[in-house]
Amino acid sequence: MTITSISKRFEYLRAANECALIPFITAGDPDLENTAEALRILDTSGADFIELGVPYSDPLADGPIIQAAATRALNNGTRLVDVLNMLQSVTRSLKSQIILFTYYNPILNLGVERFLERVAAAGVKGLVIPDLPLEEASDIINYADSVGVEVTLLVTPNSSKERIRAIALQSRGFIYLVSVIGVTGIRAQVQTRVKDVITEIRSVTDKPIGVGFGISTPEQARIMREWGADAVIVGSAFVQRLGETTPYRGLRAIREFCCDLKAAI
């Protein structure tokens, strides 16, 4: 069965009583050839979706591990157009759908409509823009809808119920719940406030909820599922394994880690 959208994939996973695993890696770290191989490995090791970060010089939402990866990728010459070209050659062979994570400035530099058309042509199905305010999101969401790309918006632990309702109404694919106040990174424990926020989101929408930022172990992933998450998003722990050793060891490490995470949820 061919699943054509993130929303449809979540419907399938819910019907099968499965929690989705969404690994995050940074494109171009250590290089785009290894990024392509990492996507293939994650695709066959339990990933349901894969979030791919476009390296950016001022990544405000990212902690030191992902910032360092972005710096390495930029120093290697990785640019947005290169990432999209790489994806165009890889996505057709993947069953996992790609969610592109990028800040808004690279989109503006390319042009919103041109960017979305290129993203769609590259086989990307989802988009996360962490510095896109809800109040300015409607135009890009509407155009993305027209080309088959779902723009997912973020909810934080201190979002009011009214703002959660407004975000849930606009968000496509799923709701991205940031599990911490602050940047991405590996943390020793998850905040219990997340459980309450999941309940609050459930009270205003039936859209799937993906929890990310700070989840770095199979045990933490299991807790997120027990608290009601439809998806667990793990970033820094993958980026660290992939980028801070040799390419061979990094690829082997993310394969094992991805399998362990999926088994836990």
Image: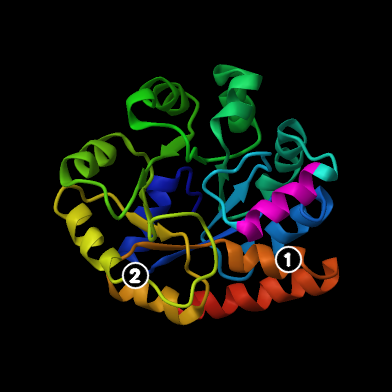
Out of 4 and 240, give the one closest to the viewer. Answer: 240
Q: What secondary structure predominates along the stretch shown in magenta?
A: helix
Out of 9 and 119, give the one closest to the viewer. Answer: 119
Question: Is residue 92 shown to the viewer in this render?
Answer: yes
Q: Residue at x 20, y 41 (%)?
A: 165
Give the color scheme: rainbow, by chain, secondary structure or one colour.
rainbow
The local crowd at label 2, few if under 14, some if 14 to 19, many if 20 or more residues have their Cα within 10 Å, is few
Out of 114 and 214, give the one closest to the viewer. Answer: 214
- Give coordinates of residue 87: x percent, y percent: 70, 42
Quarter of the figure with residue 224: bottom left
217 left or right of 190?
right
Residue 65 on the magenta span: yes
Q: Which residues are magenta?
A: 64-74
Mark 1 residue element: helix
Q: Amino acid at mark 1?
A: Leu
The numbered mark at residue 191 is: 2
Q: Amino acid at mark 2?
A: Gln
Q: Residue at x 63, y 62 (%)?
A: 43
21 left or right of 95?
left
Instruction: Identify the mark nearer the N-term, 1 or 2.
Output: 2
Give the residue at mark 1. Answer: 242
- State the quadrant of the C terminus: bottom left
Cα separation, mark 1 vs mark 2, equals 26 Å
Q: Residue at x 59, y 72 (%)?
A: 258
